[in-house]
Amino acid sequence: MGCGRMSERSVDDIVPVNEEGIIAAMRTIWEAMKIIIEPSAAVPYAAIMQRNIDIVGKRVGIILTGGNVDLDALPW
């Protein structure tokens, strides 16, 4: 494994999400937690909301970041 590259053996799954799901995840987190997050941070939660990943019976952590958000361009 080279520097900055991930081996295929390290990846269990890749799940798709759509742009609408990312926006919905951003908005849901804003409404529930009053935290504005950047779109890339919303991707894992969008996958959960769209039921593209099974989390039943699992403990899940998501890192939320917002440093790259343009407040004048929020999608809602």
Image (cartoon, rainbow, N blue to C red):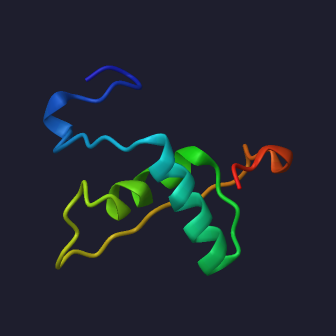
Q: Where does the image place residue 8, in percent across and percent down from the top left?
A: 17, 29
Q: Kindly identify the residue that appears in the image at 33 percent across and 62 percent down.
A: 48
Q: Kindly identify the residue that appears in the image at 56 percent across and 69 percent down.
A: 28
**Which is more toward the observer, 9 or 57?**
57
Task: Give the number of callouts.
Answer: 0
Q: Quadrant of the N terminus?
A: top left
Q: Residue furthest top?
A: 2
Q: Where does the image place residue 35, in percent across and percent down from the top left?
A: 69, 69
The quadrant holding residue 9 is top left
Q: Determine whether 68 is above or below 3 in the image.
A: below
Q: Determine whether 68 is above or below 35 in the image.
A: above
The quadrant holding residue 54 is bottom left
Q: Determine whether 37 is above or below 68 in the image.
A: below
Q: Where does the image place residue 52, in percent across and percent down from the top left?
A: 25, 54
Q: Is residue 24 left or right of residue 16?
A: right
Q: Kindly identify the residue that appears in the image at 53 percent across and 59 percent down.
A: 24
Q: Where does the image place residue 17, in percent across and percent down from the top left?
A: 37, 44
Q: Is residue 1 left or right of residue 65?
A: left
Q: Determine whether 50 is above or below 9 in the image.
A: below
